Structures are given as C-alpha cells and as structure tokens.
Amino acid sequence: MPKRLEYFFDYVSPFSYLADSQLPALAERTGAELCYRPFLLGGVMQSSGNSPPFSVPAKGRYVLLDAQRWAARYGLPLNPNSHFPINTVLPLRAALVLQRDGGFPAYHEAVFAAMWRDGLNVADPGVLRTLLEKLGIDAEHVFASCQEPEVKAALRGNTDEAVERGAFGAPTFFAGDQIFFGNDRLEFVEEALRR
C-alpha cells in the first residue's frame, strides 16, 4: 500500500505557508503521496477549544518572530500581511474547485505567495479574480463553483474531519493514524513515512 501524507492547511496560516514549501521534497524523498486538504483554521480552533496566538500579546509577538526564523531557514520571503486575519472561505473553496477541475498546484502556490510574500487580501474577490486570471483560470467558473453545495460541504467536511481526528491548528499532518502539528514537526513526519 502506498504511503500517504495528508496535509490540512489554511492560507491564513503562516506556518502552513512555511511547511508547504518543504512538502514536495519531503514527499519525493519518502515516496509518499501528498494529499492537500484545505480546511478552515477558525472552525478548527473554535471546535477544538483553541485560541489564536495573537489573543495573548506575548505569544503573538513570539509567533511572528518564530515564523521569520523559519522563513530565513527555508530561504522564503515572509512579510506581515496588514489584512490579517483574513476570512479564507472563498480562496479555500476555490482550492477545492481547482482540485476537482484542474489548476490547483499553480493556484495553491500563487495564493500562499499573494498572502505571505505580497501582503494581499486573498479573501477579496477582486484580488482573487486577478490572481486567477493571471494563471489563465476562468474566474467566473471558479466563483460560481464555490457556491455549489458540494463544494461548501467539502470544506466543512475537511474541517470537521480534521477536528474529529485530533487537529487543533494549522498545519496538521496525518501519516497513517499518526498526527503531527506545525512546520517544525516535519522531521517527525518524514520519520513516520519512512517506517
């Protein structure tokens, strides 16, 4: 049976952005199938009883510093987004549409870059339209599809499933029945996939 790594993420999470940059190489090294699972971080936190780091000022300052350390280690640009926090329902639904209809990899990379490199409000339909059009993706089709009951249900389903399996934040990974939280646990993820 092939190894499978499930990656639950939200574009609002800087640590998902950081982890995302490392996952293709990790999957290649381990031979794992990488399964991208968009979910709503706010819903996960609410359902699990967690609270955002920025609700504790000292923790919020530390999280920003730590994210910058990891970005430097990975050689990634990471800029504070003045629109943060952002309601990412629309870009996450669009991700699900593009997983189904094609175009997800380029879109996924572009949304993370727009959010954490360029500081754009990816929840703004105008910003998202521009991003989609630059990728040659039919924005009208994507926006219409985002309203489909099955797309809405898929995002809720991913969120509920993650919580049921023990998630409390992003990014969350599952390698078989083992759960891992955070970009700083990728070494453990890799070890689990190699077993």
Image (tube, rainbow, N blue to C red):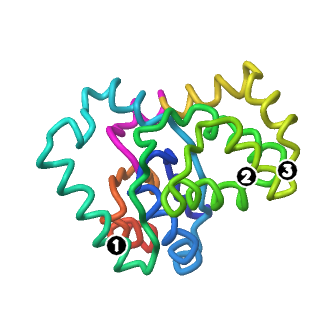
| Horizontal relation, residue 140 to residue 123: left or right | right
Please tell me whether mark 1 or mark 2 is closer to you in this view: 2
Residue 4 sits above or below residue 125 on the image = below
Q: Is residue 172 visible?
A: no
Q: CA distance from mark 1 to mark 2?
A: 33 Å
Q: Earlier in the sequence, mark 3 or mark 1?
A: 3
State yes or no: residue 69 in magenta: no
Provide the secondary structure element on which disc 2 rests: helix
Provide the secondary structure element on which disc 1 rests: helix
Q: CA distance from mark 3 to mark 1?
A: 35 Å
Give the numbered dot on residue 137: 3
Please tell me whether mark 2 or mark 3 is closer to you in this view: 2
Please tell me whether mark 3 or mark 1 is closer to you in this view: 3
| Horizontal relation, residue 33 to residue 132: left or right | left
Q: Earlier in the sequence, mark 1 or mark 2?
A: 2
Q: Is residue 107 visible?
A: yes
| Horizontal relation, residue 94 to residue 137: left or right | left
Residue position for label 2 = 131
Q: Residues within 10 Å of mark 1 (few under 14, many from 20)?
A: few
Q: Amino acid at mark 2?
A: Leu
Residue 13 sits above or below residue 134 on the image = above
Q: Going 42% across and 66% down the picture, which residue do you hit? A: 78
Q: Earlier in the sequence, mark 2 or mark 3?
A: 2
Residue position for label 1 = 187
Residue 28 picture location, percent across and down? 59, 77
Residue 95 picture location, percent across and down? 68, 44
Q: Amino acid at mark 3?
A: Ile
Provide the secondary structure element on which disc 3 rests: loop
The C terminus - image quarter: bottom left
**Highlighted magenta segment, given as a residue range:** 160-171
